[in-house]
Each structure stands twice: as structure tokens, then as C-alpha cells.
Amino acid sequence: MIDDALHALHHAEKAVVDAQGNPGSGEFQRAFQKLQLAKEQIKKHQNDELDPEERHHLDLAAEQAIHLHETLESLEDQGPL
């Protein structure tokens, strides 16, 4: 049920890693867009009736999205090297 959110988060995580390895490129914008999509997917499921395991996975995904957002903010603050 929450597979779409987890899948989107996985793609966002990969994009953030790519952006870290390629500062100043279009990778940052792609990572930001993928993270926004993942956050939307997670939010979409926040009020769903989920079993405890799915709820736990969704909560972990929401926490990971926060960390990815913080990473992107840090990259943005650093600017191009």
C-alpha cells in the first residue's frame, strides 16, 4: 500500500547521493524534485489505515525524508566548490 512512497523515497535518496558527488550540477535540482515527490507520497499515506508494520515503515520514510531535506539544504548552503 505504501510501496509508491517507499519507491519514491528510494529514488530521492539516490538523487541526493548523486547531487553530493556532483555539486553545482543539475543533480541538485533533480534531487530536490524527487524529494518533493517522495514527501508528497509519504504525506498522502499519513492518514491511511495501515497495519503496524506499514505505519512503522512510513514513519521511518518520513524521518529519512527530513534527513534528505537537511542534506540538500547543506549542499545548497555550500554552493559550487
Image (cartoon, grey):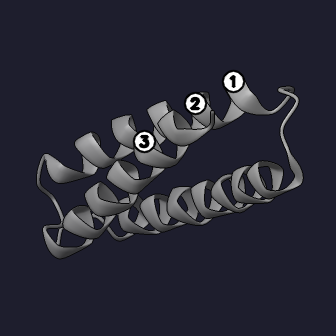
* Left or right: 33, with 50 as reference point: left
Q: Residues within 10 Å of mark 2 (few under 14, many from 20)?
A: many
- Residue 38 image offset from top left, x and y in percent: 50, 39
Q: Which residue is mark 2?
A: 41
From the top left corner, tell me how far across and down residue 58 is, in percent. Answer: 71, 50
Mark 1 residue type: Lys
Disc sitting over residue 8 in the figure: 3
- Residue 11 vs 2, above or below: the answer is below
Tag count: 3
Q: Amino acid at mark 2?
A: Gln
**Which residue is located at x 51 percent, y 61 percent?**
68
- Above/below status of 39 relative to 28: above
Residue 4, given in percent of the width and then of the height, sits at 49, 34
Q: Are marks 3 and 1 in contact (CB under 8 Å)?
A: no
Cβ–Cβ under 8 Å for marks 1 and 2: yes
Query: What's the CA distance linking mark 3 and mark 2?
Result: 7 Å
Q: Quadrant of residue 51?
A: top right
Question: From the viewer's perspective, is 23 left or right of 64?
Answer: left
Give the percent coordinates (x, y) of residue 24.
Answer: 15, 59
